[in-house]
Image: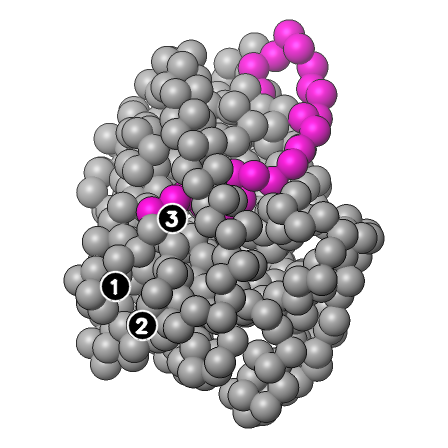
Amino acid sequence: MLRIGLLGFTLENANKGCEALTYSFLYTMQRLFGKKLTVRYYFVIELYGKIKEYFPDINFEFYQTSRKNILLDLKKDFTKNCDIVFDITYGDGFSDIYNPKSAYWNNLIKLRAGSSKTPYVLLPQTYGPFEDKKIERQAAKAIKKAVLVYSRDKLSTDYVKKISNVNAHTVTDLAFALPYTPKAFEKNKTHVGINVSGLLWKGGFYKENQFGLTVDYRKYIISLIEYFIDKPDCEVHLIPHVIESVDKSNDGDLFANDLLKNKYPSVIKAPAFSDPVECKNYIAGMDVLTAARMHATVDAFSAGVPVIPFAYSRKFEGLYGSIGYDYIVDGCKLSTNEALEKTIAMIDNREKLKNNLKKSLNIIVEKNEVFYSEIKNLQGEINVPKGKL
């Protein structure tokens, strides 16, 4: 029985992208190790979501702690009861562009876990950027603690090398492997999915235009909706990917969808999905999707749906550039009109995107198979010193 510990994962979260990474990784581990798997997970608030329903054959050990005691508990109990500890930092949390305090805290957790005798693996994720050099140096130390370091894009791999002199293995995003069953929609319509990021709609978490957009995001979204609702053969779907539980969330997508639905009654407002698989099923039924949420774009891409990511950070360029997919709208370089015209042109020419997408999916399959093989082999090498795998 292999017993693994999970750090930087979430079982239930408003952000379905964070959940998707958890579900995808557990599907992968179950594929590799079958029923001989125990998953140890610590939590502060008891939220399991549908994880037990989706994975009834996995033996879960939930370990309750408090934010105050996490570092102590990691040292005395959590890591000692695991064969391997895996950390994914919610996919893109290994950075201070969202919240420097959280970045600092995440680094402390990594340093503590990496200082144990239990092999510690950093799973495919985005690394950086860090604006605070002190936090960047702390992150470099945390990276050096891992026995194996994976990144999900070449830009992150280069960044890891630059700040820590560690050679990361470039693979891809784990959520590409999330299973799905496409939802069926009316066939005589073109279904245009628009994922409106509530984070970008509000301007950021804690300051106006936090991500330095050159695009007026609200104007861009409104213009896109108005363009397609005037086409009788099109149906516009507003698809959330961060499902907030309160009306004034700084991060959620539902409030923006509600505003737009009230303004444009003919648009279809997708439901508040309860889990990442439901979300992917809906997106898989679209004919095309444009999205600012990274894992909404991953849902579409891996389901074969032509997708136009709206980029607000280098994680988009890194991920899609590494698999040869260049159909991105850069919200930090283009004007509002340029972004709108580029998006519409790509949606109208979506068959070209679809053909390119198929080629990129082959690259993803190859990368994933290498990753699966290395993780499978890791079980027999768990006693090796750090840095030797």
- Looking at the image, tell me whether mark 1 or mark 3 is earlier in sequence order: 3
Q: Residues within 10 Å of mark 3 (few under 14, many from 20)?
A: many
Q: Which residues are drawn in magenta?
A: 170-191
Q: Position of residue 152 (x, y in %)?
A: 38, 48
Q: Name the quarter where the C terminus is drawn.
A: bottom left
Would you say 368 lies left or right of 337 here? right
| Residue at which label 1 appears | 166
Residue 346 visible in the displayed image: yes
**Which residue is more in the foreground, 248 or 65?**
65
Q: Residue at x 56, y 28 (%)?
A: 303
| Residue at which label 2 appears | 144
- Residue type at the position of mark 2: Lys
At mark 1, the secondary structure is loop
Residue 318 sits inside the magenta stretch: no
Would you say 150 lies left or right of 85 here? left
Q: In this picture, is 195 found above or below 198?
A: above
Q: Residue at x 52, y 31 (%)?
A: 302
Q: Name the quarter where the N terminus is drawn.
A: bottom right
| Residue at which label 3 appears | 152
Residues marked 1 and 2 touching at CB (< 8 Å):
yes
Residue 184 sits inside the magenta stretch: yes
Q: Position of residue 203 (x, y in %)?
A: 38, 58
Q: Position of residue 21 (x, y in %)?
A: 56, 52
**Which residue is more in the foreground, 216 or 130?**
130
Q: Nearer the viewer, mark 1 or mark 3?
A: 1
